[in-house]
Structure formats: C-alpha cells, structure tokens
Amino acid sequence: MSLSIEQIRKFLGRHEQKKLGKPGLRQAAVLMLLYPKDCELYVLLTKRTEDVEHHKGQISFPGGSMDDEDEDLVATALRESEEEVGLPKEIPQILGMLDEYETPSGFAVTPVVAYAGALPSLKHNAMEVAEILEVPLSVFLDVRNERVEKRKRMGHLIDVYFYRFGAHEIWGATAAILRAFLHSVLSKNIGGG
C-alpha cells in the first residue's frame, strides 16, 4: 500500500484542523516534510540528543515551542527546522495543518505538513539533533513494523504505537501523529469521503 502526494493534497484541502482548546498547554509546531525518493514518499525525522530539554533521545519531527517573534505556527515549524537541520525556510511548500496533539510534557503540538520536490543538503545542529533520518512512509503503512502497547496517560489507558526502522524505534507523539494522518488520508481516499 502506498500514498501519493496528490492523495495527501486532496485530503489536506478538505481537512479542517481541530484545536484542543485547553488552557495551560504550551504552543508548539513540528514540520512533517514529505519528499519523493526511490519512487515513494519519505518523511524527514530527527533523533534528538540527550542534551535537549524535552524528549531526550527520541525520534521526532523537526520542531519546537512557539517563540514570541513567530508570526504563526507555520513560522515556528519552519524556524525550528532551519535551526535543527538547516532546512532553508523557502524550500518547503506548505500543504496544511493537522489536528493539535497534546503531549504528556504539556505541549499542544500542531503538525505542519509540507512538501519538497527533493531533500536539499542538510546539516544538523549537534546540540539538538544526534541524527537526521529519512524514513519511507511505507514503514508506517506496513503492520509488520507496528507494535502496540497499552499505557496509562492522564488517568486513561491508551494505545501507544511503536514502529521499527532499522536500529531505531519510532514511538510517542511522532508515531501517533504519522499513524493518524496516514490512516485518515487512506480512509478518505478509499471511501471517497
């Protein structure tokens, strides 16, 4: 099973972003950069260093907290991506925004979906990023790569998804956002809705 950028554009063209509306959460944004490689779509992810304040050593999208200087959350995602991996702000074509996602660390994260015709040469900020990962979307569409655990979060039992990619395990907010996004795009395209 594969996805095309046309299917994603169509989905995002109809998608209305849902906001959490919870006071007390810090606003943040991440960039879900999609690009073609080896005849399929890839997503850019990073492995965080052990020196960062939140989510040490985890696989994540480039992104972070909104600054006062940021015009909006798209600006946050682009600024953070430039700071973390050296992605020039003019490269990504913004396709849309996904629903806000609440993290256990107190953030309301807005995933900003973007597309680039090719991935430019990148240079990671060694203070924040240990490694840049290029991951085919097919990894998240193949159930053989998926593992689910029940975890307690904010008093509720929830499913936590884990994906194996080489020596890396992708889980938490990154896995949840990618899984929900890909399943939504596929269900809307298959169902014609």
Image (cartoon, grey):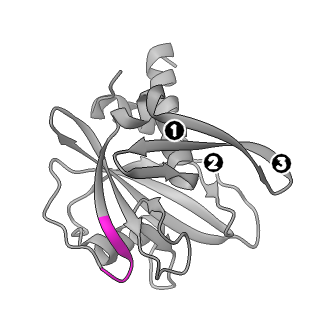
Q: Which residue shows up at 58% across the image and 53% down it?
A: 172
- Distance from disc 3 to disc 1, alpha carbons, whole Å, reads 20 Å
Question: Does the magenta run of residues contain 104?
Answer: no
Q: Nearer the viewer, residue 15 or 63?
A: 63
Q: Residue furthest right?
A: 155
Whichever of callouts 2 and 3 sits on the residue coming sooner in the sequence is 2
10 Å neighbourhood of mark 3: few (<14), some, or many (≥20)? few
Q: Is the residue 25 above or below the residue 17 in the image?
A: below
Q: For this view, does 179 lie left or right of residue 152?
A: left
- Say which residue label 1 marks: 179
Give yes or no for contact between labels 2 and 1 (Cβ–Cβ under 8 Å): no
Residue 156: give its label. Answer: 3
Q: Give the range drawn in magenta.
A: 126-131
- Say which residue label 2 marks: 18
Q: Which amino acid does label 2 sit on?
A: Lys
Q: What residue type is labelled 3?
A: His
Residue 68 position in % (x across, y down): 51, 85
Q: For this view, does 40 lie left or right of residue 19?
A: left
10 Å neighbourhood of mark 1: few (<14), some, or many (≥20)? some
Q: Which residue shows up at 51% across the image and 34% down it?
A: 146
Q: Regarding mark 3 in the picture, which secondary structure is present there?
A: strand
Whichever of callouts 2 and 1 sits on the residue coming sooner in the sequence is 2
Residue 156 position in % (x across, y down): 83, 48
- Distance from disc 2 to disc 3, alpha carbons, whole Å, reads 21 Å
Q: Which residue shows up at 45% across the image and 25% down it?
A: 186
